[in-house]
Image (cartoon, rainbow, N blue to C red):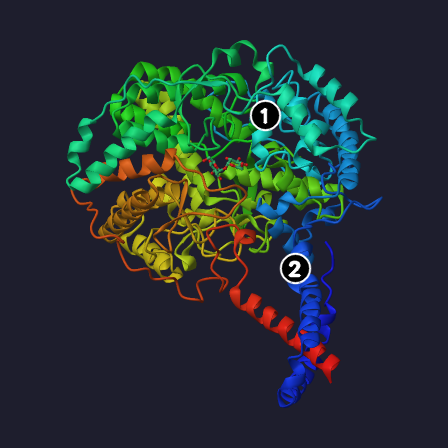
């Protein structure tokens, strides 16, 4: 980062202003001399010179060079950590928020400023570094097991034993001291393409040289027919040897030569069970709302995806994972399935009466669990080392509730158990509260390299860290946050401030444990439905004992709710997040008294979470520009809070649930009328805007947003009204509730225009200087 220096104009501005006032007055007295042709010409020359040295222009140039070129021996932009021990101090220390680090992080949030990257020579050097490290990574990742218990999850569950019979090796600091490279995919789970889509110098160089504005584009592009990974990499090595500088135009041409455009592997999709007017919509009393429901119903056809048979027959050419049935994708850049999104998509499809499509999607997940032992974040090879919130069991429950299809349930149940085993064997952790040790769950990917779909963003931020060990830890925490579905949020930041201090693996999250608690209960229910009495009892026992642990670890009576627990700090994070109410949604509590549930409602109101026009915000942290923070509201979170309150049995919460549903649906409708689109997230403060922030542009479509609105419309069909937009006046939370004073803009920071007042004062300064010089010349 270049240091900002004051220009001579700024240094001398005080003197210039004083003397200019004096000289102007004097010149006016002798005005005839000031207006001679000679002085006018001189005036213009000086003005032109001043404009050429405009201090504002200099500052803007500085701002678009986000990183220092690599110095020899220093930690570099895209350098991958070498395998080796990590100092404990590297793991626990926080990065102070210096101007350098925060500016760098800001400029790397995927905003246009990142287009101006490193000079070519430095870039080439960095790519060389990566090549060396990546080669080591590939060698290491093909070594026998050790750190990849996930790949061994083919065992089926013996459901009569306790869920915690098998304890995995704990993820302690000591264990982490010895972890080595763990790639996001390798030859074991993505043979013939992992060195293109998950690691390697080609992947690094394409990102480093900013060949595509969105890092995800390259890793989604299929390899052209009759070409292999080895051939492409050999060609790359010969045309772009490590010792030479890479010309971005030539690299772009190389990519075009070897890769098809993104989306090439998808075909036109038919949705046979789609109906223009689903019967359930008759329950929606309000005509405007009913019309909105029909518009959303139409969108299912656009979001339908069918995978070409090529992907099944020649998987080495694709990053996409093959699944047998058509599915509904989120939309936009998200062309593949996404795990937790699918729960709300399923809710919407069931509302639209699309049972066949729903069953096909659940069967897809079944086939994925069979192949990989778990459900990855999304349907691409680069998602194969992390999952997302475990909601498959809940999806099967929703489908079963509507269809009562026991045959299907019997087919799916072993796979649901197998998925549960994945979490038990790979994501559990001991939490000691008082003298009792509880086995709980964490989001915790083993991968510790940049996410390929956000390679540039991750590697750039990691360059702030002094050691490779610290970089590895950063990648692991970033990947673990993506596993949570909340990528990214102050919820995972040790200092509650910046991504630089992300420590997801220190957090034991309320929602993940609430979801798995729900799974235990549902598993018992399913066995009961199928007449497996012993297993029904065994899962129920586990559910009951887990509920006790859940309460002991997360419930804070003085905080009137459930809060994430931080292993390092040994305390709860009492900031507001909608996760505070997710246990109500999953039923992971023993009857709350009316007072207790009322207290939770009051607490949420006190925090300032219930009075925003558009719905519930994701947090009250307004300083981050992360997409899972204020002022964004997300459909899944709003839905879970509403449903949790509705199911609570407390009339006060039930009334609030309806109010929140009304606000959420109205604000989605309002934005739909403005944009003719549904968005992945919304700004809940202005009520007129799609959401923003994060590392990619807000996406339209959008699977879970459509699903949530349709589900709420059926739940409250008799009462919901479109009303007069906007639904309610905006009432922002108190300034004490908000952590920072500046609201996050919905557009990325660097695209915001310069303020006109700054530009005006600068112009006035230039005119003054020119006047002074010209006057002196005429004195
Ligand atoms: O490419 C960046 C990240 O994008 C995804 O995350 C977001 O979209 C998903 C699909 O709607 C959603 O499930 C997730 O909650 C969003 O934050 C992806 O899931 C991430 O893994 C990825 O790094």
Residue 161 to residue 406: above or below: below
Residue at the disc numbered 1: 150
Most foreground residue, 426 or 228: 228
Residue 185 to residue 674: above or below: above
Q: Position of residue 147 (x, y in %)?
A: 67, 28
Quadrant of the image containing the C terminus: bottom right
Q: Position of residue 162 (x, y in %)?
A: 47, 29
Quadrant of the image containing the N terminus: bottom right
Foreground mark, 1 or 2?
2
Residue extending furthest toward the front: 37
Which residue is painted at 52% across and 65% down in the image?
756
Q: Position of residue 660 (x, y in %)?
A: 29, 50
**Callout 1: 10 Å neighbours few (<14), some, many (20+)?**
many
Instruction: Give the quarter of the image for residue 317.
Output: top right
Which residue is painted at 77% across and 28% down in the image?
136
Residue 57: numbered disc = 2
Asked whether, in this view, residue 404 is left or right of residue 687, the answer is left
Q: Is residue 540 visible?
A: no
Asked whether, in this view, residue 437 is left or right of residue 703, the answer is right
Most foreground residue, 574 or 274: 274
Residue 486: numbered disc = none
Asked whether, in this view, residue 245 is left or right of residue 652, the answer is right
Q: Position of residue 597 (x, y in %)?
A: 31, 52
Most foreground residue, 232 or 654: 232
């Amino acid at each position: 980062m270049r240091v900002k220096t004051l220009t001579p104009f700024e240094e001398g501005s005080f003197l210039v202003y004083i003397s200019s006032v004096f000289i102007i007055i004097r010149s006016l007295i002798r005005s005839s001399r000031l207006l001679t042709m000679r002085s006018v010409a001189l005036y213009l020359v000086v003005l032109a010179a001043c404009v050429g040295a405009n201090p504002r222009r200099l500052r803007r140039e500085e701002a678009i060079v986000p990183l220092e070129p690599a110095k020899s021996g220093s930690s570099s932009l895209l350098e991958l950590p070498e395998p080796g021990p990590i100092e404990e101090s590297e793991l626990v220390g926080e990065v102070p928020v210096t101007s350098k680090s925060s500016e760098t992080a800001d400029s790397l949030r995927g905003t246009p400023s990142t287009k101006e990257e490193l000079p070519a020579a430095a870039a080439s050097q960095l790519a060389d570094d990566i090549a060396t490290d990546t080669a080591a990574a590939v060698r290491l990742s093909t070594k026998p097991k050790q750190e990849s218990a996930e790949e061994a999850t083919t065992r089926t569950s013996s459901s009569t034993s306790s869920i915690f019979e098998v304890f995995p090796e704990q993820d302690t600091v000591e264990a982490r001291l010895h972890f080595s490279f763990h790639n996001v995919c390798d030859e074991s789970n993505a043979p013939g393409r992992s060195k293109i889509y998950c690691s390697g110098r080609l992947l690094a160089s394409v990102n480093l040289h900013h060949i595509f504005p969105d890092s995800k584009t390259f890793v989604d592009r299929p390899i052209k027919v009759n070409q292999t990974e080895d051939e492409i990499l050999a060609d790359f090595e010969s045309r772009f040897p490590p010792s030479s500088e890479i010309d971005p135009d030539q690299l772009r041409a190389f990519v075009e030569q070897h890769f098809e455009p993104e989306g090439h592997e998808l075909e036109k999709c038919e949705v046979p069970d789609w109906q223009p007017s689903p019967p359930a919509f008759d329950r929606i009393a309000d005509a405007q709302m009913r019309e909105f429901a029909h518009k959303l119903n139409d969108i299912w056809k656009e979001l339908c995806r069918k995978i070409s048979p090529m992907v099944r027959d020649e998987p080495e050419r694709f990053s996409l994972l093959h699944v047998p049935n058509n599915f509904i994708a989120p939309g936009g850049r998200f062309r593949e399935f996404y795990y937790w999104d699918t729960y709300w998509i399923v809710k919407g499809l069931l509302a639209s009466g699309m049972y066949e499509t729903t069953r096909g999607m659940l069967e897809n997940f079944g086939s994925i669990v069979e192949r990989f032992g778990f459900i990855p974040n999304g349907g691409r090879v680069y998602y194969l080392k992390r999952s997302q919130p475990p909601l498959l069991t809940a999806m099967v429950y929703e489908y079963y509730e509507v269809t009562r299809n026991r045959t299907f349930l019997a087919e799916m149940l072993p796979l649901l158990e197998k998925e549960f085993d994945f979490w038990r064997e790979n994501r559990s952790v001991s939490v000691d509260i008082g003298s009792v040790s509880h086995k709980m769950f964490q989001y915790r990917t083993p991968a510790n390299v940049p996410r390929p779909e956000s390679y540039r963003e991750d590697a750039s931020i990691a360059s702030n860290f002094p050691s490779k060990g610290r970089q590895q830890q950063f990648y692991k925490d970033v990947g673990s946050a993506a596993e949570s579905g909340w990528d990214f949020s102050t919820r995972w930041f040790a200092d509650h401030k910046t991504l630089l201090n992300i420590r997801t693996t220190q957090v034991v999250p309320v929602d993940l444990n609430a979801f798995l608690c729900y799974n235990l209960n549902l598993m018992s229910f399913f066995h009961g439905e199928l007449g497996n009495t012993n297993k029904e009892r065994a899962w129920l026992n586990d559910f009951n004992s887990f509920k006790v642990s859940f309460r002991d670890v997360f419930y804070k009576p003085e905080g009137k709710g459930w809060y994430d627990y931080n292993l390092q700090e040994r305390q709860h994070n009492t900031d507001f997040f909608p996760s505070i109410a997710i246990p109500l949604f999953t039923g992971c509590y023993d009857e709350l008294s009316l007072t207790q549930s009322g207290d939770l409602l009051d607490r949420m109101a006190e925090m300032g979470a219930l009075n925003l026009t558009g719905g519930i915000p994701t947090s009250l942290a307004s300083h981050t520009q992360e997409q899972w923070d204020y002022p964004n509201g997300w459909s899944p979170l709003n839905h879970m809070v509403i449903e949790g309150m509705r199911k609570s049995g407390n009339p006060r919460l039930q009334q609030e649930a309806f109010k929140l549903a009304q606000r959420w649906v109205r604000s989605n409708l309002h934005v739909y009328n403005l944009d003719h689109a549904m968005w992945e997230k919304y700004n809940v403060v202005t009520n007129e805007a799609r959401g923003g922030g994060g590392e990619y542009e807000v996406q339209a479509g959008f699977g879970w947003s459509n699903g949530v609105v349709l589900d709420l419309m059926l739940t409250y069909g008799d009462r919901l009204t479109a009303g007069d937009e906007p639904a309610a006046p905006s009432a922002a939370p108190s300034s004490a509730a908000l952590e920072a004073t500046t609201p996050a803009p919905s557009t990325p920071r660097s695209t915001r225009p310069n303020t006109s007042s700054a530009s005006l004062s600068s112009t006035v300064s230039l005119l003054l200087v020119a006047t002074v010089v010209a006057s002196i010349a005429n004195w």
